[in-house]
Image: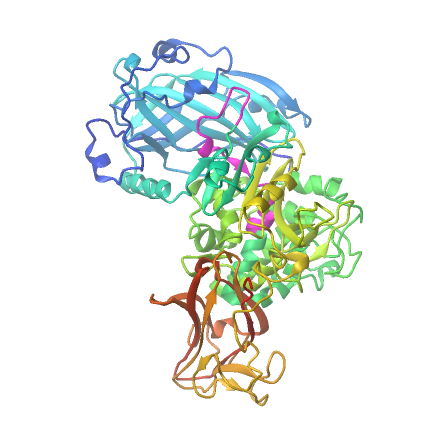
């Protein structure tokens, strides 16, 4: 994960300014929340003045505040929409090494920008790149991402408008991100010189400052669907989580004793990129320090994923496939889905084994010795798909698959390739795993365009995603991914995106499936690509009930802690410091991590009392359920019970039929982790890949309307599998939970439900 080559850029800029007299295109767009700017334009500027941008030179980096939107910025008077091209960047500018343990700076191209051409549109004072996320440039060393910037007017700029943009240099074939800024003046047809600098990164092994000032050309127009791009960006901004500075956490929750200064602590300040704490739907953020002061586009700072991709790509892809095709997908073998995995060492290794780091194939049994060894370094260096695959498959069989944890980034690569093959077997050759995750999970969760691309083999947009690394995050995007996994429990807008049973296991909410125990001096749990650490009274006396905190972890100093009280904490740094236990203690002050919220205590987040009556149906009658005739069934002739004798048997008649099962329950206030749990068996005679027979679970608040939470169909055929459906959003309410089975004209499907529970505080 540490090797790479940097970029050449083909990201194009085009901007449409919303001035005090808006252009027709801008007027037709949805305005960005917070616009227009209302400053006077009276900006006192000593750095990057109009004269300096017109004919100056860059001798060194300057404070990043010179690139920031000033308090008195006025609305831009010019509209920018078209292509900006920077000239002569291959030899221009200066470079100063900060850290270079891999001797990357010996390659001259790494000391300069790649060819840089970008299209932008403008919505009011916002400059929006047409291409978002990582862009393949063709450079031997750098790829590029350009973030959304701002345009404004200052009285000292001679009637021209001023623009500033964040951008990131991304190491080719790797995941390191080096964040920079550029600025220029513009009018309707021309631009000044462009000043740029790079003064921060999230990269453990290669750190530098880069600066320069070059001539540039502006080609107005030529942007397809510019108005649609403007409106989409306005919607993106409106959909971001509310943000507040981390200091607001104490004022928002007085009397809890929470100390905001703990968040972000334990990390060397010069190594810290940013951090945030997500609680009750608010993203409490830290700033983004650099070697030249705070990064002025902190919300757009691009952050590498490194091994958080093992969780967010590998683990979440499995949960999505399981939701679509049933949890048995985890048991599909690598060798049956990856043609190159034909050697004996890969016989019997499943997708689940690979995501658990338990393939049984390794060289050294010592903690992460293989990960830092020559084979894995060759894997990271390999850019071509065939080379990467060959190295990933080269480890010999040492243990029975599923029994021994041994960490390999290459195993996640193999797992994602196998899942890609499995998806194609269901959805056709045109399907692609990362596209599925992007379109069916990340986009519905509100993740923005900056985080919807990934690094791929062959340095090509059509290459294979790396799987175990290569994604990118912003503060808002990683907060939304964490919220989906914790507070939202895999559901968005009432639609279950991630399989609840696999999500419960990954989040340590299923005591019967906690994954494997890792090697090393600190015993962690590892399940479906997610780490977990146990906390109890021996950790700190304040923890009177044991619990476990799952987390995503990334090379160099990246942690996303997914706490069982629904909060999450993310920190990005690059000095090999992983300090986050103190943040768990502060979160515990806000909402205690009670026994049963995951891990050793088991359960779902509330204590042992159960709101469901007769959950096992062993009374032989429905009450307190309301059920269709024949649903409560004690015969094993057709379908067996999960436990005991009785169960709820829905449909299975092979003709048009409706079966219902419902119960009204009260979920106490404060029970934010309440989760309905039950065992579901689906047996079908259907043979085609269509949803002919369906089972819906709906919730209806007292006096409200029904809302579908999850749907299963004949395509989810499975033996008894534990289902977990979050109901914390209904804490403090009385609701009716209803299962409705709808079977069509031909071929029977049986939906069998047993051992239903809803633990709530009692």
Q: Position of residue 80 (x, y in %)?
A: 29, 28
Front residue of this view, candidates 434 and 204: 204
Q: Residue at x 44, y 16 (%)?
A: 213
Give the image quarter of residue 754.
bottom right
* Place of residue 205 in the rendered image (x, y in percent of width and height, measured from the top left): 65, 29
Residue at the front extreme of this rendering? 255
**Which range of residues does the magenta coloring cover?**
289-313
- Measured as percent of width and height from the top left, residue 686 is found at 47, 79
| Quadrant occupied by the C terminus | bottom right
693 displayed left or right of 29: right
Question: Residue 624, position in %: x, y?
Answer: 48, 79
116 vs 553: above or below: above
- Look at the image and tell me in which quarter the N terminus lies: top right
- The number of numbered badges drawn on the structure is 0
Q: Does residue 304 belong to the magenta stretch?
A: yes
Q: Nearer the viewer, residue 100 or 140?
A: 100
Can the viewer see residue 134? no
Q: Can the viewer see residue 732?
A: yes
Q: What colour scheme does the image use?
A: rainbow
Magenta span includes 504: no
Above or below, comparing residue 655 to residue 557 in the picture:
below
Pick the residue in front: 151 or 409: 151
């Amino acid at each position: 994960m540490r090797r790479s080559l940097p970029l050449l850029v083909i990201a194009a800029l085009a901007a449409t300014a919303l001035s005090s007299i808006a252009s027709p295109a801008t007027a037709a767009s949805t305005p960005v929340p917070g616009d227009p700017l209302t400053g006077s334009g009276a900006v006192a500027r000593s750095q990057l003045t109009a004269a300096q941008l017109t004919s100056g030179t860059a001798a060194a980096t300057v404070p990043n505040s010179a690139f920031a939107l000033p308090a008195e910025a006025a609305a831009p008077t010019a509209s920018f929409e078209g292509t900006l091209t920077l000239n002569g960047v291959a030899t221009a500018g200066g470079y100063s090494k900060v850290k270079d343990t891999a001797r990357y700076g010996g390659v001259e191209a790494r000391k300069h920008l790649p060819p840089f051409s970008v299209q932008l549109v403008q919505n009011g004072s916002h400059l929006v790149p047409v291409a978002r996320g990582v862009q393949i440039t063709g450079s031997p060393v750098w790829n590029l991402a350009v973030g959304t910037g701002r345009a404004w007017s200052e009285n000292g700029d001679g009637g021209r408008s001023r623009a500033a943009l964040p951008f990131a240099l991304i190491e080719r074939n790797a995941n390191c991100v080096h964040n920079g800024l550029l600025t220029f003046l513009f009018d309707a047809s021309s631009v000044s010189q462009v000043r740029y600098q790079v003064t921060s990164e999230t990269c453990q092994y290669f750190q530098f400052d880069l600066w320069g000032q070059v001539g540039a050309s502006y080609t107005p127009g030529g942007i397809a669907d510019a108005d649609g791009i403007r409106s989409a960006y306005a919607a993106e901004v409106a959909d971001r989580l509310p943000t507040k500075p981390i200091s607001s956490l104490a004022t928002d929750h007085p009397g809890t004793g929470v100390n905001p200064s703990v968040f972000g602590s334990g990390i060397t300040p010069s190594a810290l990129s940013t951090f945030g704490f997500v609680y009750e739907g608010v993203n409490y953020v830290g700033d983004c320090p650099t070697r030249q002061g705070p990064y002025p586009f902190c919300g757009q700072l691009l952050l590498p994923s490194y091994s958080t991709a093992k969780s967010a790509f590998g683990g979440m892809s499995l949960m999505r496939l399981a939701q679509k095709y049933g949890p048995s997908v985890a048991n599909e073998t690598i060798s049956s889905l990856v043609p190159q995995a034909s050697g004996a060492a890969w016989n019997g290794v499943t997708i689940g084994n690979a995501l658990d780091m338990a393939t049984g194939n390794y060289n050294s049994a010592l903690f992460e010795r293989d990960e830092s060894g020559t084979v894995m370094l060759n894997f990271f260096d390999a850019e071509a798909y065939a080379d990467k695959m060959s190295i990933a498959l080269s480890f010999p069989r040492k243990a029975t698959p599923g029994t021994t944890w041994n960490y390999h980034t290459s195993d996640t690569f193999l797992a994602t390739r196998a899942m890609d093959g499995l998806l194609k077997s269901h959805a056709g050759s045109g399907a692609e795993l990362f596209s599925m995750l992007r379109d069916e999970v990340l986009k519905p969760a509100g993740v923005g365009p900056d985080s919807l691309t990934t690094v791929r083999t062959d340095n090509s947009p059509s290459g294979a995603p790396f799987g175990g690394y290569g994604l990118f995050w912003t503060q808002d995007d990683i907060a939304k991914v964490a919220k989906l996994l914790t507070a939202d429990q895999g559901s968005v807008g009432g639609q279950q995106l991630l399989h609840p049973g696999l999500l419960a296991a990954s989040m340590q909410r299923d005591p019967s499936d906690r994954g494997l125990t890792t090697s090393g001096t600190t015993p962690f749990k590892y399940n479906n690509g997610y780490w977990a650490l146990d906390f109890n009274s021996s950790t700190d006396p304040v923890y009177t009930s044991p619990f476990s905190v799952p987390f995503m972890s990334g090379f160099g100093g990246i942690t996303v802690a997914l706490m069982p009280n629904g909060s999450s904490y993310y920190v990005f740094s690059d000095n090999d410091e992983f300090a986050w236990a103190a943040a768990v203690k502060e979160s515990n002050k806000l909402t205690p991590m009670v026994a049963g919220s995951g891990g050793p205590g088991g359960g779902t987040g509330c204590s042992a009392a159960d709101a469901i009556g007769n959950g096992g149906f062993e009374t032989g009658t429905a009450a307190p359920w309301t059920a269709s005739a024949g649903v409560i069934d004690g015969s094993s002739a057709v379908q067996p019970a999960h436990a005991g004798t009785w169960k709820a048997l829905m449909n299975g008649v092979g003709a048009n039929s409706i079966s219902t099962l419902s119960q009204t329950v009260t979920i106490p206030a404060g029970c934010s982790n309440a989760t309905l749990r039950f065992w579901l068996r689906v047996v079908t005679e259907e043979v085609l890949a269509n949803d002919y027979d369906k089972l819906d679970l709906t919730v209806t608040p007292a006096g409200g309307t029904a809302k579908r939470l999850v749907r299963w169909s004949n395509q989810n055929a499975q033996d008894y599998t534990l289902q977990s459906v979050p109901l914390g959003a209904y804490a403090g309410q009385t609701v009716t939970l209803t299962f409705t089975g709808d079977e069509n004209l031909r071929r029977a499907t049986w939906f069998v439900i047993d051992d239903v529970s809803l633990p709530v505080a009692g």
